[in-house]
Image (cartoon, helix red, strand yellow):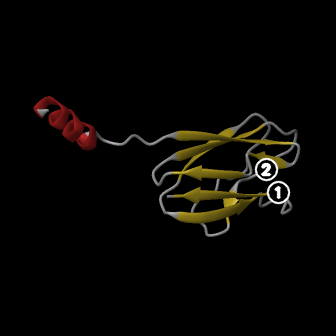
Amino acid sequence: MRTMLVLALLAFAMPAYAANHAVQIKGMKFTPSKISVAVGDTITFTNADPMTHTATALDGSFDTGHLATGKSAKVKISAAGAHPFHCAIHSSMKGTVTAK
């Protein structure tokens, strides 16, 4: 019984590791367009389209800058809540990051 208690306490004491998620830009859309992450996680946006795109949060919390074909950018999600984003060049391209 004591061993189980020690193991349970150790599990709670272990640090949580941030995850990395992937979003692909292809066919004039973000895939996936809706993604759920934890605060502190990163998202790698990769442009597989033949034209330049961005992934720009409407609340200003992240911006990949211009991504040419084949380029990637990582953004860290630092606040909880919904963070709608779009391509600043092609406003019809939209998505949402939800962080808990």
Residue 42 in the image: state x and y as whole percent: 53, 45
Foreground mark, 2 or 1?
Answer: 1
Q: Residues within 10 Å of mark 1 (few under 14, many from 20)?
A: some
Work out whether 59 lies above or below 18: below
**Which SS class for mark 1?**
loop
Image quarter (top left, top right, bottom left or bottom right) of the N terminus = top left
Q: Nearer the viewer, residue 90 or 81?
A: 81
* Residue name at image x 60 percent, y 65 percent: 82
Pointer 2 residue: 53
Q: Residue at x 36, y 42 (%)?
A: 16
Q: Residue furthest bottom?
A: 59
* Horizontal relation, residue 4 to residue 68: left or right: left
Label 2 or label 1, whichever comes before in sequence order: 2
Q: Which mark is residue 93?
A: 1
Q: Amino acid at mark 1?
A: Met
Q: Is residue 68 left or right of residue 40?
A: right
Evaluate if marks 2 and 1 touch, with contact meaning CB atoms under 8 Å apart: yes
Quarter occupied by residue 56: bottom right
Q: Is residue 70 above or below residue 34?
A: above
